Image: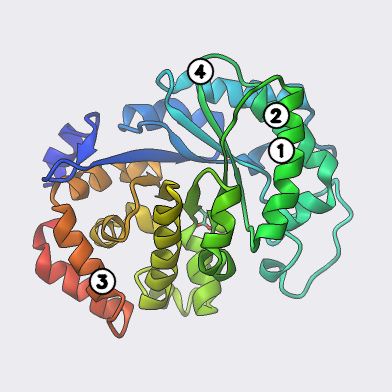
């Protein structure tokens, strides 16, 4: 299974009954792009843009940011999606050039979209850089840590101003669904969002109230927890009704045992670390969509993530 997976990593992946599932790479800087493409990435489903902002006394200007985004776009196949997430610093990632309050619970504090809306000048500069990437590029902008439609609307106003100023008729703006609030309110976000991408790392942390980095509880921070699955289901349901695509860009997407459940809930794109691309595509090729749909419904009713994992293993022993 493993050797065959690696051998076919460059080919697109479809389920046995022919549903194409896009497998993209998560990137943390431009340097990782060629390796991800070689590993079979069909684009970048999550560029964590924090690398541009950390460990420096002043934020990067528009030109510097654009150079970096353009370098990634140029290293991907022409027209391939490149989803650039706006700044997600704050929380556990300090920002030396901003006067940040000390917070007792930074994961529940001033971070992501909340920080961007309080520093719109930072957000505008980044949006200009993203919208300035040239050529036949599938550049898409994505907002982290959104919790409601009001926040999204405020960000979209800024985005639309910058889009118009850049002379673009159209540019996609999507949201990360990584808070339970966003998953539950996905139907109210959908009118303002061109796509959803589920950040299962934070979604799991916030749904289960377990720190994603907890050492003693590491085995329990499992995105296959039925509570997390129901949140994903809520998001997928709302997205399907509104005709919006859903991807998963948290690490759950690169877990072969999770692939049938995610696909069954309606996820059509999986963005994973480069090292997980071959295994993720192999998992997709082992599945039949209708079986996944049926199984996903059952998984949402199970008693624990362990029960879900056991059931996947029993049904698809080849996934391990
Ligand atoms: C997530 O939360 O699942 C995610 C993809 O974002 P990050 O890991 O950068 O918080
Ligand atoms: Mg996150």
Of marks 4 and 2, which one's residue comes earlier in the chain?
4
For the residue with label 3, is its CB less than 8 Å from the closest atom of ligand 1?
no
Q: Secondary structure at mark 4?
A: helix
Mark 2–mark 1 Cα distance, whole angstroms, equals 6 Å
Residue 243 against residue 186 in the figure, above or below:
above
Of marks 1 and 4, which one's residue comes earlier in the chain?
4
The numbered mark at residue 159 is: 1
Other residues around mark 1 within 10 Å, as few (<14) / some (14–19) / many (≥20): many
Q: Which of these two is toward me, 31 or 85?
A: 85
Q: Secondary structure at mark 1?
A: helix
Mark 3–mark 4 Cα distance, whole angstroms, equals 41 Å
Q: Which residue is mark 2?
A: 163
Q: Which residue is mark 3?
A: 297
Q: Which residue is mark 4?
A: 74
Q: Are marks 2 and 1 in contact (CB under 8 Å)?
A: yes
Image spot of residue 180 (x, y percent): 54, 70
Question: To which quarter of the image does residue 57 belong?
Answer: top right
């Amino acid at each position: 299974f493993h050797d065959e997976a690696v051998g076919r990593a460059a080919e697109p992946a479809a389920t046995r009954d022919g549903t194409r599932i896009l497998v993209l790479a998560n990137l943390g800087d431009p340097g990782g792009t060629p390796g991800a493409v070689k590993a079979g990435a069909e684009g970048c489903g999550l560029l964590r843009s924090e690398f541009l902002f950390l460990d420096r006394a002043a934020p990067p200007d528009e030109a510097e940011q654009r150079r970096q985004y353009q370098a990634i776009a140029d290293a991907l196949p022409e027209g391939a999606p490149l989803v650039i997430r706006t700044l997600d610093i704050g929380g556990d990632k300090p920002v030396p050039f901003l006067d940040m309050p000390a917070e007792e619970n930074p994961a529940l504090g001033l971070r992501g979209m909340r920080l961007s809306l309080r520093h719109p000048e930072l957000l505008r500069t980044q949006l200009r850089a993203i919208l300035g990437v040239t050529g036949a590029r599938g550049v898409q902008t994505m907002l982290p840590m959104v919790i409601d439609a009001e926040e999204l609307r405020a960000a979209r106003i800024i985005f639309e101003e910058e889009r118009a100023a850049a002379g673009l008729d159209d540019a996609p703006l999507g949201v990360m669904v990584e808070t339970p609030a966003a998953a539950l309110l996905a139907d109210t976000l959908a009118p303002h969002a061109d796509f959803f991408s589920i950040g299962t790392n934070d979604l799991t942390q916030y749904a289960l109230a377990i720190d994603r980095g907890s050492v003693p509880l590491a085995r329990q921070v499992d995105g296959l927890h039925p509570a997390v699955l129901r949140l994903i289901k809520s998001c997928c349901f709302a997205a399907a009704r509104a005709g919006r695509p859903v991807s998963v860009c948290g690490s759950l997407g690169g877990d072969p045992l999770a692939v049938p459940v995610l696909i069954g809930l309606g996820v059509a794109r999986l963005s994973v670390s480069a090292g997980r691309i071959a295994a993720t595509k192999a998992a997709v090729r082992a599945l039949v969509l209708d079986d996944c749909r049926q199984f996903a419904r059952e998984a949402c009713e199970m008693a624990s993530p362990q029960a879900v994992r056991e059931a996947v293993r029993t049904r698809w022993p080849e996934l391990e």
